[in-house]
Image (cartoon, helix red, strand yellow):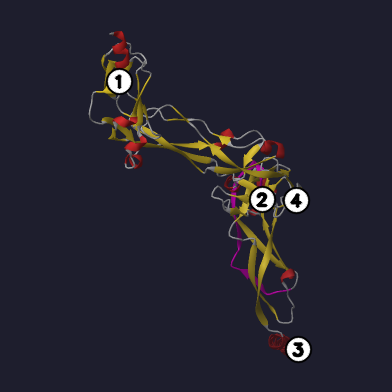
Amino acid sequence: MKNRLMNNWGLKLLSIVSAVILWMVVVSVDNPVRTVTFSNIPVEIINGSAITSEGMVYTVLDNTDVITIEVEARRQTELSASDFHAVANMQDIQLMKYVPINITCSKPVESITTDTPNLRISIEDEEEKVLPIVVRAAGTPGDGYVVDRVNTIASPESVRISGAASAVQRVSQAVVEVDVSGLTMDTEKSGAIVFYNSDGDVLDDKTLSYNIDIHDIDVSVRLLKTKEVPIQVTTTGTVADGYRATQVNCEPSRITVAGDESALEALSSISLPAVSISNARANVEQVVDITEYLPENVQLVDEDATSVAVTVVVEQLETGTVALSKNRITMEGLSEEFTASFLTTTDVTLSVRSLREQMTELDPEDWSATVDLSGITETGTYELPLIINVPEGYELTEEARVAVRIEQAAGLSDTAE
């Protein structure tokens, strides 16, 4: 009887096990396990104060705070990305650069795996920097107007950035750009700050913090009228003997400036300091910063065009001779009791010099001279200097003299006898 009872329990247990196995087979057939992939699962970072409380900041590397997971779950279990919660607890940091990511699901699943098991971070000292906010005008104001760079300002005028030392140090400029196209009066604008590094590249570091709303900065745009004026420059000193300063050139020769109406009305030119050409035997060149010579309340329209190249052209003179005919020499100042005549029978040779192109055009007919006889009171032979009427552009290299005979006037001699 007892053996029979034991045999019945064995059969019952076998039946139960068989039923469970059969149920599992049925479930596996009707509700099999499948693999599902979810991307862009955000990782929640908690207990960050474990690092920041020590005056340090952390930066997530390689976008490891957004992960992709692979889930094994029954087909009948409906899943979405919102069912998963990924957490990185900063208190669990390892080697000061890895934080394990713990992934849970609000619904029953078989398993969860990811190829990003750790949040990777870098830890640095915290640093801050204050930068002035630079206003940059885009577009061109109305004709005859320009943006007043001095008085066009942002409000607030500076921004304080903070974050990891390496990130803060990369930022060198904070710029707000506003459109001024067609403006003919002062205007209020607004814009967002764009940060640049020292190479002029845009920086978009979301790990940085700011003391103001960088997306809404007020800008007061102020306009000035414009005017084009010439640049004037003079020379001082004398070039070396045998040379001549022929031109003074400025590049540019005119500039466009901006200012209020009263300042522009009083401005007719920009005068630069005189250029010394003392003993020069070649061109004299200087580069001048014109901003130093702008009147008060006047500025350049092109803030980069500050340099003016001044060149004084110095040319060597060429020498030559010109034959001055005696009939082109006038005698002046002789008393009526005397007469005068030239002793020489040939033309007077003048030694002259000038620029090459003028020497090729040398014409004796352009030359004339006088002899001053006003101081002569006795007859005799005199060697007197010629007073040359030198044409423009020429100069004498040596004094010219002429021999003159002075005699008693004939009528006066007969009277005296």
Q: Amino acid at mark 2?
A: Ala
Disc 1 target residue:
340
Provide the residue designation for mark 3.
Answer: 5
Q: Percent position (x, y) of residue 314? A: 38, 36
Q: In terms of secondary structure, where does tag 2 sit? A: strand
**Location of residue 417 by image quarter:** top left
Residue 71 marker? none
Viewer-side residue, 91 vs 28: 91
Tell me which label, 4 or 3, sits earlier in the chain: 3
What's the residue at 35%, 40% (across, down)? 358
| Label 4 vs 1, first from the N-terminus | 4
User: What label does residue 137 carry, if any?
Assistant: 2
Q: Which residue is mark 4?
A: 189
Of mark 2 and mark 4, the one earlier in the sequence is: 2
Give the image location of residue 318, x and y in percent: 30, 36
- Mark pair 2, 4: CA separation: 11 Å
Between disc 1 and disc 2, the foreground one is: 1
**Where in the figure is residue 107, as x and y percent of width and height?**
75, 72
Q: Is residue 133 magenta?
A: yes
Q: Tell which of 348 and 226 is nearer to you.
A: 348
Choose mark 1 or mark 3, whichever is in front: 1
Residue 128 lies in magenta, yes or no?
Answer: yes
Give the Cα separation between the discs numbered 3 and 2.
100 Å
Left of 158 or right of it: where is 383? left
Amino acid bearing label 4: Lys
User: Which mark is in front, 4 or 3?
Assistant: 4
